[in-house]
Image: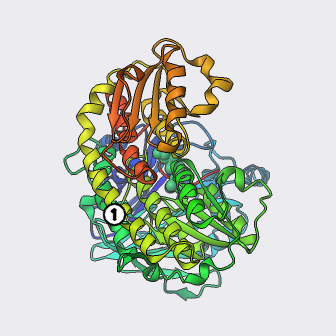
Amino acid sequence: MCGIIGFTGILDAKTVLTEGLKELEYRGYDSAGISFFTDNGIRTVKATGKVSNLCDKVKEESKETAACGIGHTRWATHGGVSDVNCHPHKAGKVTLIHNGIIENYKELQEELAKDGQFPVSQTDSEIAAMVINSCYNGNPVQAIKDAVKKLDGAYAFCIMFEDHPDVIYAIRNGSPLVAASCEEGSVIASDMVALIKYSKDYFVLPERHIARLTKNEIVVTDMEHRVIMPKMLHVNWDVAAARKGGYDYFMLKEIHEQPDSLRNTIAPRVVDGLPDFTADQIPDSMFDGIHKIVITACGTAMHAGLIGKNMIEKLTRVPVSVEIASEFRYASPIIDEHTLVITISQSGETADTLAALRLARENGSKTLSIVNVKGSSIARESDYVLYTHAGPEIAVASTKAYTVQLSALYLFAFRFALVTGKLTEEAARDYIGKLEHAISIVEEVLSYDKQIETICQRLKTAEDLFFIGRGLDYGLSCEGSIKLKEISYIHSEAYAAGELKHGTISLITDNIPVIALATQENVLPKMISNIREVRSRGAMVILVTNAEVTVDASLCDHLIKLPAIADEFAPFAAAVVLQYIAYYTAISRGLNVDQPRNLAKSVTVE
Ligand code: M6R
């Protein structure tokens, strides 16, 4: 969603802002703009399309130097993609950028109209600027305080006041903002990827607190004007982690980073060969009295839950349901203090997942989150956090975040079963061994790239495609399908293989590609029958199996055999195959894999 950057200090602000916006491109956007202080007041430059368009315009239109400014990439919600709707927005002395949605903007607009004030854009953000301006009497902090009382919804604002040169004010509610002081000045952004160049130490601006950034310091005050010291955080990755490092796309780089991400996530939780959450400050008492587990998340993170459910139920015999967060939050779920609600999120900022977490807390459930971004909203609001250590994930299509989420869920299952006596130490050690072994298998599957790239040539012109599987392979099919859809734009569906004949098989005709996952021995004969059913209707079958499985050549057009791996751990290996299928199919269609149309990396609106 929208990206935000603000800088004040001794560097050239226009360069800091445009470079920062390039770092934030991965979030998804359709236009970009910057505003900066000049000797003649605040100057704004905007452009639709890529940040490079904005950079060209900045070069053409503005020769001034600037030490302070704000910049924004917009992902349209209210109002189409146009220069006028692009941020920053100006109202009187106020110039502002916004990430989020002001839900009551219509009512506010009507109020402003009574005073003869009308917006020039169709955005809710301009209305916010107008409200702040109408509250402004020379005191920025007071104006912001008064204005936010009138605003409903989610927001992260960076605001400049014309008569307060080289100062940036910021406030947030729901939408993310992180800030850092460095030798060159003060910088604020929607995420660390834009800050890392300046500092590895940063803080998350607490909600409904106001930050005042000057070149020498950042002062944070609460709504009662008390100065507070925000909790400092540190990232353990550097600028290189947020660069392509020689790969054509971030997605490919991130696929290749999976062995390291898995090692970094698993190793700190293994002590003497056993699962251990001491370093995560998760006490064994967390597992007391849990009668039921609900896993709730969106997209790929939810698909990780589908796989995790299997291992948790198998080892603990505690029922697990996996819920789409955007559905869960509006249902009236049957959860209570005996329910553990697990939220999974790479970004830790997904609006629906955050709302689901809040609902769980309201119902008195214990909450555990599996999150990649330190200090994110979901992490901060959960009772317990298991951080995954994938490093920054830049490509919109989630890859390494998925496999580390699987590993965190497996570790959770092992620890839960161990502390509740369902697993002996010996058995727990054996499971840990298999999980560690899965890392080397992932490494091996990374070398399948050429084989898969060749197979994907056959998918290049497909219009419809199916992923089928049973048990764990059905959960994996869901992930394979979303990955392919989002970056290749080929319509695809994931189906439980046994369910096909109840309707969907009517869509299988000559040469329709079917990607059949058959890694689970307990359902293998049934799965083979289902593959024969689609094959006899003309499907072009790409079959993914485990090493031990022998299939006759007539069953498929292409066979991808995973290295030998225990069935329950096959999802780690098969995930890489599915990621490659999506990646090379999109590449064969000449698409920009990292920035698929209409999508945003972190979905901070409903
Ligand atoms: O940041 P989150 O993990 O909460 O994001 C959830 C989904 O938006 C995300 O997994 C999405 O489905 C991916 N783009 C899929 O590759």
Q: Quadrant of residue 172?
A: bottom right
The foreground one among 523 and 436 is 523
Residue 14: % across, % down: 32, 56
Image location (x, y in percent) of residue 374: 45, 70
Residue to which mark 1 is pinned: 436
Considering every residue shown, the one lying at the far left of the view is 246
- Count of numbered circles on the image: 1
Under mark 1, the amino acid is Glu
User: Can residue 139 be seen here?
Assistant: no
Numbered disc 1: secondary structure: helix
Residue 69 x %, y %: 40, 61
Position above or below: 165 against 547: below
Q: Nearer the viewer, residue 585 or 505?
A: 505
Sort mark 1 into few (<14), some (14-19) or many (20+) by Cα contacts within 10 Å.
some
In front of the other: 401 or 578:
578
Q: Residue at x 63, y 68 (%)?
A: 136
Asked which colour scheme the image uses, the reply is rainbow
Residue 314 higher or lower than 252, as above or below = below
Residue 384 visible in image: yes
Residue appearing at x 54%, y 49% in the figure:
303
| Residue 416 x, y percent position in the rendering | 55, 73
